[in-house]
Amino acid sequence: MPTTRHVKQYDHLKVLSAKLISEIPEVMAGFGELHSCAVAAGALDTKSKELIALGIAISVHCDGCIGFHVHDALNAGASREEILEAIGVAILMGGSPSMVYGCEAMEALNEFEKEQNPPI
């Protein structure tokens, strides 16, 4: 099965992030700790936090962030319907530009779902 654009971008950013860790380890360690703390379960569970992060990623038009947070929301147990509702809220808050990036998030969702459930 061919790898799709969002999956390729996700994989590429993972490689680049590892390189950045070797170049600026203190900064990246701090960022990693911030990320871990921010998405750790608390009053909100990790799935909810990833859905919030996805909505923000769409609203600020961050292509790489969209793929990461779709991927991580799925891994945290988010359903397709929950991710699509998060996309809808992002469109509400961000208007037409967020609709365009919401389409990108939906495409990323489709790609990551195919990676998780390849056709037989």
Image (cartoon, grey):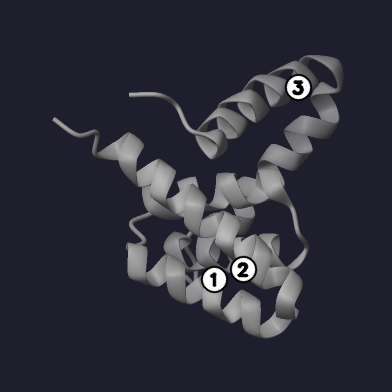
Of tags 1 and 3, which is closer to the observer? 1
Identity, as a three-letter code, of the amino acid under mark 1 = Ile
x then y, percent, for residue 23: 85, 16
Instruction: Name above or below for residue 111 compared with residue 74.
Output: above
Cα distance in 3D space between marks 2 and 3: 26 Å
Q: Earlier in the sequence, mark 1 or mark 3?
A: 3
Q: Is 5 on the left or on the right of 76, as rendered?
A: right
Q: Is residue 43 above or below residue 3?
A: below
Quadrant where the N terminus sits is: top left
> Can the viewer see residue 82?
yes
Query: Mark 2: which secondary structure?
Result: helix
Name the kind of residue labelled 3 in the image. Ile
As drawn, the residue found furthest toward the left would be 120
Locate the C terminus by quadrant.
top left
Circle 2 is placed at which residue position? 55
Q: Which mark is residue 21?
A: 3
* Residue at 64% from the left image edge and 78% from the top image edge: 91
Give how far apart the Cα atoms at labels 1 and 2 are.
6 Å
Dot 1 surroundings within 10 Å: few (below 14), some, or many (20 or more)? Answer: many
Instruction: Tell me the distance, in whole angstroms, between the alpha carbons under discs 1 and 3.
Output: 31 Å
Residue contact between numbered discs 1 and 2, judged by CB atoms under 8 Å: yes
Q: Mark 3 or mark 2, which is nearer the start of the sequence?
A: 3
Horizontally, is 29 left or right of 24 in the view? left
Viewer can see residue 45: no
Residue at the location (57% across, 62% down)?
103
User: Which of the two residues, 113 or 31, is positioned nearer the viewer here?
Assistant: 113
Q: Secondary structure at mark 3?
A: helix
Q: Amino acid at mark 2?
A: Gly
